């Protein structure tokens, strides 16, 4: 985890008239990377001149201030596929989406399965300077599923790895999963599981198994392939007394297992992606264009009943967090026949607008809940939370990671305005509610007026 | 007719009637000594086969040649993904040579559908993965119509590995469109996922019991069962499959003598179809092959000659 101190002197910022979590209105003064003052009598401070010389004033009238977002699940592609995304371009996409920290998945080339590889990701994130890039370590060497990677050394490294995942692949072997859960307990680590039983959903499985996959003749990816692994893993967590995290929960059955496990007091947390909260498997039908690999993702898009169950679970806390599974791909890796095309879709820039559209505009959640599921809980799960870390309340003394959202910022998504290097954007052409107007990382604006501020510019 | 033939869903009953009327004329040409018609002179048809095929490829090739089109075969095993080139790049390269029709076979479902969005040429789906094989369904229906007259209200029974069969998917759509009653028969493991909802919506019946269905059949269509499915656990043994779902000598005796027996080939004699059934007088297997050329001539004619007006 990075030290929560700015690397160099920072221009003070006065955010005027922001609605804190959509509740009380206040001015926020950011000095030296911290929230220096919270003034609940808006307007008075600036006129009184009680701000340091050279303060930048940001008008936040009508905007909601939230703690900077934390993404538990991002693919940044560097090293290995810099043509699809780099740590710098992925950091830019994160900042544009309101994020202050992202966890970078280990399935790069080479895999993040050593201390050195983790430190390199960490350092490249520092150099990009827009968000904290926190490497996720592989659970098993080379994501091979057999031998544990050097989990402890990754944790002891400068990168301080606490979250381990073979994401993209499931830790399918129960013995390996058990050992991993036990081992990371020594340093408060957590295993984030990509739940996909490879016998029930093999590598070619690419469409939710159901009537549509039957009609389209696409290899089915049944919900049960996720649910049996989640069920097994919560029992392993109970048996070992360890903590397990379920990546990209996608089915109603998974929600039922999570609800049961939490009621038993088992240490399990779970995330859901924005796309599983809104998009459905029908998008693959020929009436909707047909076999468009833009909508190919793992786990696959599910039917409306699953989507509904996931929304309920997010609102009631059964699912702890929203995580993007941002998965950039070069165009040519998507321009294959559907079963041959790469899995994954972009997500960082659109996550908050999607959550606003699905959960806030519909009255299912308030902004306080959004702060919980997109910042506070993910920061806790990743071990980067607390009063001096990410996801802390907007209070005096807290690190100045925050963003300003325009709740009335309805907009049509245009994939060509993305700052990601890739264009596999399933939201292109969709109207989403709310937009990110400004992001601050340790008091430094990374986005202002809805546009990226490059470091040093 | 639409510009491409990707799926039976692209066709109306009138389109099919038109295709069959032309096919009947083409069928007569097959019996002439000189079989070439000038209809597609100067047009280029590329048979782009990413998957092995002998009968479909040669059938389309003969169809194109008898219509005087320049017909070129391009075959490439394996997916373009494994060669590092995207499917889009592969087909754009071929289309750039100046192609009027692309007859395409691909091991991946939806491939022809995707390609039709990238190229200007007319795309004929000659089989995409486990999705559709519309020219096969058309030649099957054409063959059955010649045997039975109208298919309206006639009961056609399809038996075999439905999960992995593009012939089943195209046939069930084509036959129901022409008014036939369709029952599909397979063990539960070889039924596609969600088949109950699909059958209800599309108006066909499903059964696990061939012996219950067979006496009511006006036509039987046996589908190929690949032996490698056994290792996938879809059924325990060839013997058990044959006893449960094969068109055996015993079951042949149950069929009326005028009930046509179809098989898209290649046949696994002794597995899904006994030699006695394959070679029976009522077998339509070779008629299917000969009708295939006529129907494919008709498809190419209507997609290519039709666009000059």
Image (tube, coloured by chain):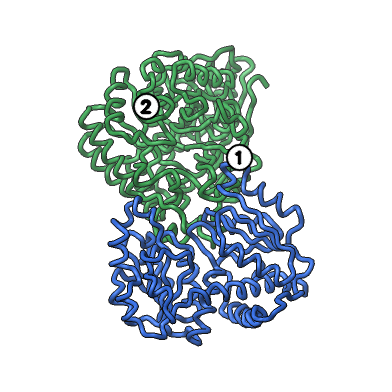
Chain colours: A green, B blue
**Other-residue count near label 2 (Cα within 10 Å), few / some / many at <14 / 14–19 / ≥20:** some
Residue sitting nearer the eye, A14 or B239: B239
Q: Which residue is mark 2?
A: A380
Q: Residue furthest right?
A: B42
Residue B116 in the image: state x and y as whole percent: 64, 59
Q: Residues within 10 Å of mark 1 (few under 14, many from 20)?
A: few
* Mark 2 → mark 1, Cα distance in angstroms: 42 Å
**Residue B211 falls in image quadrant:** bottom left
Residue at horizontal 34 percent and vertical 42 percent from the top? A197
Q: Quadrant of residue B213?
A: bottom left
Q: Which quarter of the figure is the C terminus of chain A placed in?
A: top right
Q: Nearer the viewer, residue A327 or B160?
A: B160
Q: Does residue A305 appear in the picture of this structure?
A: yes
- The image quadrant of residue B138 is bottom right
Q: Position of residue A228 (x, y in %)?
A: 29, 43
Residue B84 - label: 1
Figure check: A406 above or below B155: above
């Amino acid at each position: 985890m990075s030290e929560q101190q700015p690397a160099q002197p920072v221009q003070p910022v006065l955010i005027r008239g922001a609605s804190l979590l959509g509740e009380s209105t206040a001015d926020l003064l950011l000095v030296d990377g911290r929230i220096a003052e919270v003034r609940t009598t808006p307007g008075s401070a600036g006129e009184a001149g009680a701000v340091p010389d050279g303060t930048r004033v940001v008008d936040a009238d009508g905007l909601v201030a939230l703690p900077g977002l934390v993404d538990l699940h991002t693919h940044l592609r560097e090293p290995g596929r810099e043509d699809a995304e780099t740590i710098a371009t992925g950091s830019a996409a994160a900042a544009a989406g309101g994020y202050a920290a992202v966890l970078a998945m280990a399935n790069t080339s080479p895999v993040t399965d050593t201390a050195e590889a983790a430190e390199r990701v960490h350092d490249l994130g520092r150099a990009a300077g827009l968000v904290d890039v926190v490497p996720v370590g592989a659970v098993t060497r080379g994501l091979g599923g057999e031998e544990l990677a050097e989990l402890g050394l990754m944790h002891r490294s400068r990168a301080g790895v606490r979250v381990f995942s073979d994401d993209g692949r499931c830790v399918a072997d129960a013995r390996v999963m058990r050992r991993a859960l036990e081992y990371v307990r020594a340093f408060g680590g957590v295993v984030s599981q990509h739940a996909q039983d490879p016998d029930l959903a093999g590598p070619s499985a690419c469409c939710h198994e159901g009537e549509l996959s039957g009609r389209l003749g696409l290899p089915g990816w049944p919900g049960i392939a996720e649910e049996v692994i989640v069920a097994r893993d919560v029992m392993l967590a109970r048996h070992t007394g360890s903590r397990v995290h379920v990546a990209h929960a996608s089915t109603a059955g998974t929600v039922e297992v999570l609800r049961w496990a939490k009621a038993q007091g088992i240490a399990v947390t779970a995330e859901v992606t924005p796309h599983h909260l809104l998009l459905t498997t029908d998008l693959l039908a020929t009436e909707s264009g047909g076999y468009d690999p833009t909508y190919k993702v793992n786990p696959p898009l599910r039917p409306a009943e699953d989507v509904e169950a996931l929304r309920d679970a997010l609102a009631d806390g059964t699912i702890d967090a929203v995580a993007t599974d941002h998965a950039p791909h070069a165009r040519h890796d998507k321009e294959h026949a559907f079963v041959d095309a790469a899995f994954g879709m972009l997500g960082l820039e659109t996550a908050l607008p999607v959550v606003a559209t699905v959960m806030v505009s519909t009255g299912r959640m308030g902004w306080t809940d959004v702060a919980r599921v997109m910042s506070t809980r993910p920061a806790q799960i990743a071990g980067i939370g607390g009063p001096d870390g990410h996801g802390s309340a907007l209070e005096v003394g807290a690190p100045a990671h925050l963003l300003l959202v325009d709740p009335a910022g309805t907009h049509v998504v245009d994939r060509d305005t993305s700052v990601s290097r890739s264009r596999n954007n399933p939201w292109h052409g969709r109207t989403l509610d709310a937009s990110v107007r400004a992001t601050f990382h340790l008091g430094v604006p990374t986005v202002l007026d809805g546009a990226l501020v490059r470091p040093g510019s | 007719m639409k510009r491409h033939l990707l799926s039976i869903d692209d066709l109306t009953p009138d389109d099919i009637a038109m295709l069959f009327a032309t096919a009947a004329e083409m069928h007569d040409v097959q019996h002439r000594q000189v079989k070439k018609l000038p209809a597609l002179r100067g047009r280029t048809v590329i048979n782009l086969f990413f998957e092995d095929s002998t009968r479909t490829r040669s059938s389309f090739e003969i169809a194109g040649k008898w219509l005087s089109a320049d017909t070129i075969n391009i075959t490439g095993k394996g997916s373009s993904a494994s060669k590092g080139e995207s499917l889009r790049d592969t087909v754009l390269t071929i289309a750039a040579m100046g192609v009027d029709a692309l007859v395409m076979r691909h091991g991946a479902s939806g491939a022809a559908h995707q390609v039709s969005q990238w190229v200007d040429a007319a795309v004929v789906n000659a089989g995409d993965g486990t999705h559709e094989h519309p020219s096969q369904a058309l030649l099957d229906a054409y063959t059955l119509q010649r045997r039975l007259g109208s298919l309206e209200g006639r009961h056609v029974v399809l038996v075999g590995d439905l999960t992995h069969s593009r012939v089943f998917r195209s046939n069930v759509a084509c036959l129901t469109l022409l008014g036939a009653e369709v029952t599909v028969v397979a063990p539960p493991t070889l039924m596609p996922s969600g088949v109950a909802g699909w059958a209800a919506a599309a108006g066909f019946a499903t059964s696990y019991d061939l012996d219950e269905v067979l006496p009511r059949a006006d036509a039987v269509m046996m589908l190929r069962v690949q032996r490698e499915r056994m290792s996938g656990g879809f059924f325990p043994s060839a013997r058990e499959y044959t006893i449960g779902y094969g068109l055996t000598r015993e079951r042949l005796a149950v069929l009326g003598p005028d009930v046509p027996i179809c098989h898209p080939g290649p046949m696994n004699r002794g597995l899904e179809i006994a030699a006695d059934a394959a070679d029976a007088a009522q077998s339509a297997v070779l008629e299917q092959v000969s009708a295939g050329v006529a129907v494919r001539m008709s498809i190419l004619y209507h997609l290519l000659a039709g666009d000059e007006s």
